[in-house]
Amino acid sequence: MGELPVVLGLGSAVLLAAVLAVRFSTRLGLPSLLLYLAIGVLLGEAGFGIQFSDPFLTQALGLAALVMILTEGGLTTRWSAVKPALGQGVALSTVAVGLSIAITGPALHWLLGLDWRMALLWGAVLASTDSAAVFSVLRGVGVPRRIVGALELESGINDAPAYIAVVVLAEGTRIDWSLPLLVVYELGAGLVLGLLLGLAGAWALRRAALPATGLYPLATVAVCVVAYSSGQLLHASGLLATYVAAVVLGNSRLPHRSDTLSFAEGLGWLAQIGLFVLLGLFASPERLLESIVPGLIAAAVVLVFARPVSVLVSQLPFKVPLREQVFLSWAGLRGAVPIVLAMIPLSQEMPGAQRLVDAVFVLVIVLTLVQGLTLGPLARVLRLKADTEPKEIEVDAAPLDELQAELLQVKIQHGSRLHGVYLSELRLPAGASLSLIVRDGRSFTPQRTDRLQRGDQILIVSTESAREAAERRIRAVDRAGPLARWKGESGN
C-alpha cells in the first residue's frame, strides 16, 4: 500500500511531462512519439534504473493501447473524406502489405543472412504503417483529403493482415494453399463483425436514456473494445473489427457526439503516451547500439525499395498521378505498431527475435525522424499542399448538438481564389452559413457586402447534412474563384 503514492505520483509526472512534450515537439517540428520513447529510456536501466524486460506484458499492453488508438482514429475518421479513396486504401492495406513482405523478406535474407522464416517475419513486422503516427502527423500536413483518406484507411486496416502474417510466421504454421483462405476469413469476419457491432451500438446509443452525458463516450468506446474481444474469440481479426466499428459509430448520429470525440481523443493520447513510454522503458540502449547497422539496412530496404514498389503496384488500377504515388510512398509512417508486432516472436522465444526487436527500435526512430520531418516540405515540393481544406472544430455546445450542426474553420492562404470574393458570391448550400471572420487579430460578424481577404480565418456553421456540400463549395471557390461552377470546378 505504501508504494501506491509513489506509483501514482511517478505516473502523473510522466504524463505531465509527455503532455508538455507535445507542445515542445510541435515548436521544433519533431514527432512527439520520439520524446515519449526518450522519457521511457530515461526511466529505464540506463537512466533512473527501472528494470522492465517482460515481453509478454509489453505485448499485451501494446495491443490494448493499439485498440484504443484504432478506436480514436476510427471515431474521428469521416466517411465522406475516406470514401473517395476507399479502393486505394484497401489496396494499400492488403496488396501492398503482401508485396512489402515479399520484397523485404528476400532482401534481408540476402543482406543480413537471416533464415527464410525469420527474414519473412522481419518483412511482416515492417509491413504495417502506424495508425498513431498517421492520425497525429498526417492530418496536420495539409494535403488533399483523398490522399489523407487513403493513408488513414491503410493505417487503420493494415495492422490486421500484418498481425496475421506475424502470428503465422512466429508460430511456425505450415504455409500451404489453405493459408490465403484463412487470411480472407479472418479479415472478412472482422469486417462483418465490426459493421454489425457498430450499427447495433449506434442504434442502441440513440435509444438509450443514460442518466449522465459522460456515460455516452464510455459506452461508445466499450462497443469498440467489445468488437476487438469478439473478433479474437471468433478467430477473426479483432483489430479490423475495432476500426470498422469505430468508423461506423463515428459517422452515426450519436447523442453528445462532440463529447464522445473529445473523450476518444484524450483516450487516444493517453494510449499513445503510455505505449511509447512503455516501449522506451523496455528498450536497452546498449543493445540498440549493436543494432544500428541492421536497423539502418532494414530502414533503407523499406523506404527506398519495398514501400515504393508496393505502392506503385497496388495503385495501378486507380491511375494515381506520379507525384501522389511519391507522397504515398514516403508517408508510410512507422511507429509503435512494428515494435508491438516484434514482441510476438520474442514472447515465444524464437531464436533471433531479440535482434529483430532491437533493429525495429532503431528503424522506427530513424524513419520517424526522416519521414516525419520531411512530409510537409515534400508536399510543398510536389505541389500537394491544401491548406485551405476546411477543418472541423470540436465544440461541446448543447445547441449545436441538438441541431446536429458543426463548426468548420478555413484559413485563406496566399494564392487562394477565395481572396476578394464577396460573401454574396460564396453561395454556400442551404444549412451552412459563414458566421464569423477573424482578420488581423480582430473578429466581426460578416455582411453580404464584405469581401474575403488573404489571411482571413472564417468560421462556418453547417448542419451535418450540408457539411459535405459546403466543403466542396469552399474547395471549388478556393481553386477557381466565384465562377467555379461555370468553369467546371466541382471541389471534389
Image (cartoon, rainbow, N blue to C red):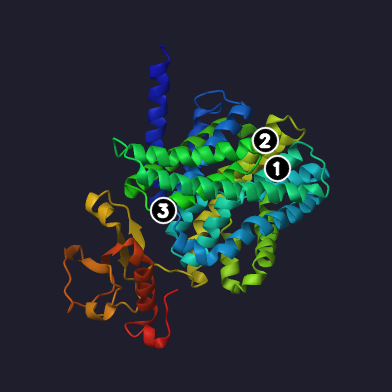
Look at mark 1 in the image and give the residue it sits on.
166
Residue lying at 56% horizontally and 65% vertically, measured from the top left: 327
On screen, residue 301 above or below 448: above
**Looking at the picture, how far across and down is residue 417, in whole percent?**
34, 79
Could you say which quadrant of the image residue 91 lies in? bottom right
**Looking at the picture, how far across and down is residue 292, in whole percent?**
66, 43
Disc 3 residue type (three-letter): Ser
* SS of the residue under disc 1: helix
Q: Nearer the viewer, residue 431 or 437?
A: 431
Disc 2 residue type (three-letter): Ile
Dot in front, 3 or 2: 3
Dot in front, 3 or 1: 3
**Looking at the picture, how far across and down is residue 338, in whole percent?**
62, 44
On screen, residue 395 above or below 37: below
Residue lying at 31% horizontally and 83% vertically, measured from the top left: 482
* Labelled disc at residue 344: 2
- How far separated are the C-alphas under marks 2 and 1? 8 Å
* Labelled disc at residue 131: none
Q: Given the current orientation, which residue lies at the most extreme front position?
A: 207
Q: Residues within 10 Å of mark 1 (few under 14, many from 20)?
A: many
Does label 2 or label 1 sit earlier along the sequence? Answer: 1
